[in-house]
């Protein structure tokens, strides 16, 4: 609270710029798949959801690990145990969510089996 707003902003701008660049790369990657997205327009509906979910999952993981680091519950030496644990946790959450999202997309929204399967396979990978 004692730091002026411009110091807070100057500390954040670097990381936020990096995140903005990475999100811009997403647009470039999507541009590379224009033909696929034109043929499978349904897939384009879910790109924001997948990208947002990946960001939310990553943010939650970073917050959890930083909190544990700051409280002393873990140290840098625990990284070899924390990284696989967080990765497997994310994979499990992704499988659980994909098990709900893919059938809903297919049976409720009428999304094709092909695109629903892509969703089911992709969600665990971005979790």
Image: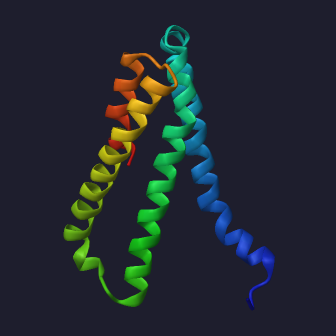
Q: In the figure, 69 relative to 52: above or below? A: below
Q: In the figure, 61 relative to 48: above or below? A: below
Q: Nearer the viewer, residue 59 or 4?
A: 59
Q: How is the image coloured?
A: rainbow
Quarter containing the N terminus: bottom right
Q: Residue furthest front?
A: 108
Residue 88 placement (x, y as % from top left) = 24, 56
Residue 17 placement (x, y as % from top left) = 64, 53
Residue 10 placement (x, y as % from top left) = 71, 69
Residue at (74, 77) in percent of width and height: 7
Q: Nearer the viewer, residue 14 or 111?
A: 111
> How many labels, in total?
0
Residue at (23, 76) in percent of width and height: 78
- The answer to which image quadrant residue 120 occupies is top left
In the displayed structure, does residue 52 sit left or right of residue 61?
right
Residue at (46, 28) in percent of width and height: 105
Q: In the figure, 18 relative to 120: above or below? A: below
Residue at (65, 67) in percent of width and height: 12
Q: Nearer the viewer, residue 41 or 107?
A: 107
Residue 20 placement (x, y as % from top left) = 63, 47
């Amino acid at each position: 609270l004692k730091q002026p707003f411009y110091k807070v902003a100057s500390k954040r701008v670097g990381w936020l710029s990096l995140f903005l660049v990475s999100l811009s790369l997403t647009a470039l990657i999507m541009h590379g798949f224009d033909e696929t997205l034109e043929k499978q327009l349904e897939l384009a509906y879910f790109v924001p959801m997948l990208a947002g979910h990946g960001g939310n999952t990553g943010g939650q993981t970073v917050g959890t690990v930083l909190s544990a680091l700051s409280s002393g519950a873990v140290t840098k030496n625990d990284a070899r145990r924390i990284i696989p644990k967080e990765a497997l946790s994310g994979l499990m959450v992704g499988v659980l969510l994909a098990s709900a999202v893919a059938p809903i997309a297919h049976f409720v929204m009428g999304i094709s089996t092909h695109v629903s399967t892509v969703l089911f396979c992709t969600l665990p990978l971005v979790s």
